[in-house]
Amino acid sequence: MFGATVVPKIERYTQGAAIDFYESKQGQDVYVSVIGFKSYAHLFYFQKQPNTAPASTANMTQEEFGQWLLNGQVDKPVFFVTRIDRYEEYKNHPNLELIEEKNGFVFLKRKNI
């Protein structure tokens, strides 16, 4: 019983800002990804649809796909989420602009699609 009532509250407390961001992008024709840390939350809460990327990305690893989203010729807007402690390495990236910092997360948008 303890786990059933406390665990959802912990998730909301620790990841609430990121979950809200992912859910705000649902239904939009955009890419949403994380950088600088591993998570599957964006796949669940964004409700990513399979096979929405160009065929040229089909054989890419997750790391290669992430680099394509960050630096490649993308076909639609790209949003990234990173943790505040990982933001420094992306802070001056020429393809990224800051949207918001909230509750330990940083939300970024890819420039110039």
Image (tube, helix red, strand yellow):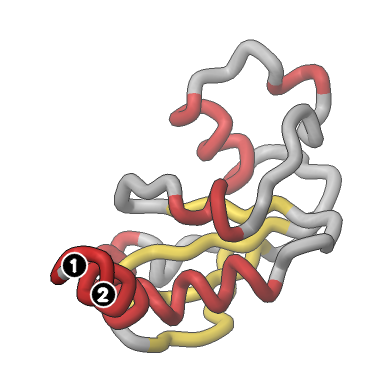
> Relative to residue 73, is residue 42 drawn left or right?
left
90 or 1: nearer the viewer: 1
Identify the residue under disc 2: 5
Determine the residue positioned at 62% across, 55% down.
32
Identify the residue under disc 1: 1
Q: Secondary structure at mark 2?
A: helix
Can you give x and y, in whole percent of width and height, for residue 86 in the image?
A: 26, 64
Label 2 Cα crowd, 10 Å radius (few <14 / some 14-19 / many 20+): few
Determine the residue positioned at 44% across, 80% down.
17
> Which quarter of the rendered picture does the N terminus lie within?
bottom left
State which quadrant residue 50 falls in: top right
Q: Residue furthest left?
A: 2
> Which quarter of the rendered picture does the C terminus lie within?
bottom right
Q: Secondary structure at mark 1?
A: loop
| Residue 57 vertical placement versus 29 (above, below) | above
Q: Give the residue type that dot 1 points to.
A: Met
Label 1 Cα crowd, 10 Å radius (few <14 / some 14-19 / many 20+): few
Can you give x and y, in whole percent of width and height, for residue 85 in the image?
A: 21, 70
Q: Give the residue type that dot 2 points to.
A: Thr
Frontmost of labels 1 and 2 is 1
State which quadrant residue 9 falls in: bottom left
Q: CA distance from mark 1 to mark 2?
A: 7 Å
Q: Is residue 110 visible?
A: yes
| Residue 110 vertical placement versus 52 (above, below) | below
